[in-house]
Image (cartoon, rainbow, N blue to C red):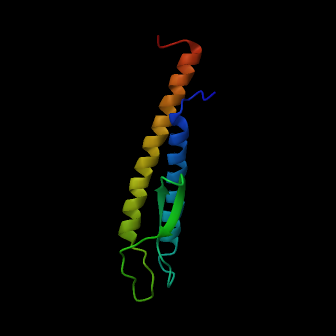
Amino acid sequence: MDMLGSGAASIQSFLDLAADRHRVIQENLANINTPGYRAKNVSFDQQLGRAMVTEREGINPRQDGNTVVPEIENAELRKNQLVYRLFLQAMTHRTRLARSAIAGRGQ
């Protein structure tokens, strides 16, 4: 029995996705000076139900072939942090509701 409801698995999936995105964005920033490095992106493939890491598209490579744009990566990092916090709050809320129901409060 799922104590947190069926939505908890979805929330956990999105938290995992946000963690994966954070790791990839950090990797992009760490390779900002690596010649030929192609910036990556993480997207969620609804049909497969998993995260997919792909090269970031639509960015013209620098002379050394690197496609990391620090402004884009930092904006993506901030956006991802907000998304992670949102889903973490949703999971926390579901946990509190379950605890309250078990304790018999909130009636």
Left or right of 39: which side holds 72? left
x, y percent for residue 50? 55, 54
User: In the picture shown, does residue 78 fall above or below 99?
Assistant: below
Q: Residue at x 56, y 22 (%)?
A: 99
* Quadrant of the drawing holding the N terminus: top right
Q: Residue furthest front?
A: 47
In this rendering, the count of numbered labels is 0
Q: Is residue 73 left or right of residue 24?
A: left
Q: Of residues 71 and 58, which is closer to you in this image?
A: 58
Residue at image coords 42%, 42%: 86
Q: Whole-percent x and y of residue 60?
A: 36, 81
User: Does 76 sit above or below residue 93?
Assistant: below
Residue under the image location 53 percent in, 68 percent down: 27
Residue 25: x and y in percent read 48, 64
From the viewer's perspective, is residue 25 above or below residue 103? Answer: below
Establish if 35 lies above or below 89: below
- Rendering coords of residue 20 (x, y %): 54, 57
Furthest-right residue in this view: 1
